[in-house]
Structures are given as C-alpha cells and as structure tokens.
Image (tube, helix red, strand yellow):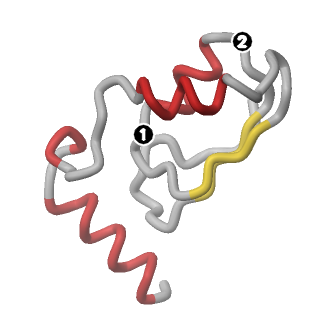
Amino acid sequence: MNEKVAHWNAVYDAREEEYLTWYETQPTLSYQLITQDLKLGETFIDVGGGASKLISILHAAGYGRWIQLVAATHCENFSAGV
C-alpha cells in the first residue's frame, strides 16, 4: 500500500464520517453547480469524493453512469459505474 492510501485510510479510521472536516449531510452547493451543466443520463466522474453523499444524490435524481476515484480503500462509496 502506498503512503497516500495509508494516510487516507488512517484519516477515515480515526473518526466517524460526520466528524470529518469536509463532511456535508447535504452537498447542496456542489449539487447545484454540477446540475447546471450535467444532463440527466450523462456519465460523470467524482475525483476525491471520499465519503461524500453527492454520488448517491445525483444517481437518485436520475443522473447517469458514474465513476468515483478516491485514495482511501475504506470509503463506503468507493465504486465505479451503475
């Protein structure tokens, strides 16, 4: 395992998701910015999404196939495609 993966795994292991400094229950601003240009059904990529709820919210709203890239192997949302 490389140093970056080990670092992010340690960050996620150290605290619950809602106590991470970047955690948002509802990523409203990100959702608004993305959906201004992303059309329903279009494929998108989320780089560094971590434990963000954004992917799930976009998918539930009908946005297309997706890929999420994260450095930590412990992220629940680490996945590709739908």
Label 2 and label 1: CA atoms lie apart by 18 Å
The residue singled out by tag 2 in the image is: 62
* Residue 34 horizontal/vertical position (percent): 64, 32
31 and 55: which is toward the camera? 31
Query: Amino acid type of disc 1?
Result: Ser
- Look at the numbered discs 2 and 1 and tell me whether their residues touch, using CB distance below 8 Å: no
Q: Give the side of residue 44 with respect to residue 52, left or right.
A: right
* Residue 9 horizontal/vertical position (percent): 34, 68
Query: Amino acid type of disc 2?
Result: Gly
For the point 44% across and 64% down, which residue is it?
72
6 and 49: which is toward the camera? 49
25 and 31: which is toward the camera? 31
Q: Give the side of residue 33 with respect to residue 10, left or right.
A: right
Q: To which quarter of the image does residue 35 belong?
A: top right
Q: To which quarter of the image does residue 53 belong?
A: top left
For the point 35% across and 23% down, which residue is it?
26
The residue singled out by tag 1 in the image is: 52
* Residue 39 horizontal/vertical position (percent): 81, 21
Q: To which quarter of the image does residue 51 belong?
A: top left
For the point 85% across and 27% down, which residue is it?
42
Q: Give the side of residue 45 with respect to residue 56, left or right.
A: right
Relative height, residue 4 to residue 78 (above, below): below
- Work out whether mark 2 precedes mark 1 in sequence or the reverse, and give the earlier one: 1
Quadrant including the C terminus: top right
* Residue 10 horizontal/vertical position (percent): 26, 71
Q: Which residue is most to the right?
A: 42
Q: Secondary structure at mark 2?
A: loop
Q: Secondary structure at mark 1?
A: loop
> Local crowd at mark 1 within 10 Å, few (<14), some, or many (≥20)?
many
Relative height, residue 1 to residue 28 (above, below): below
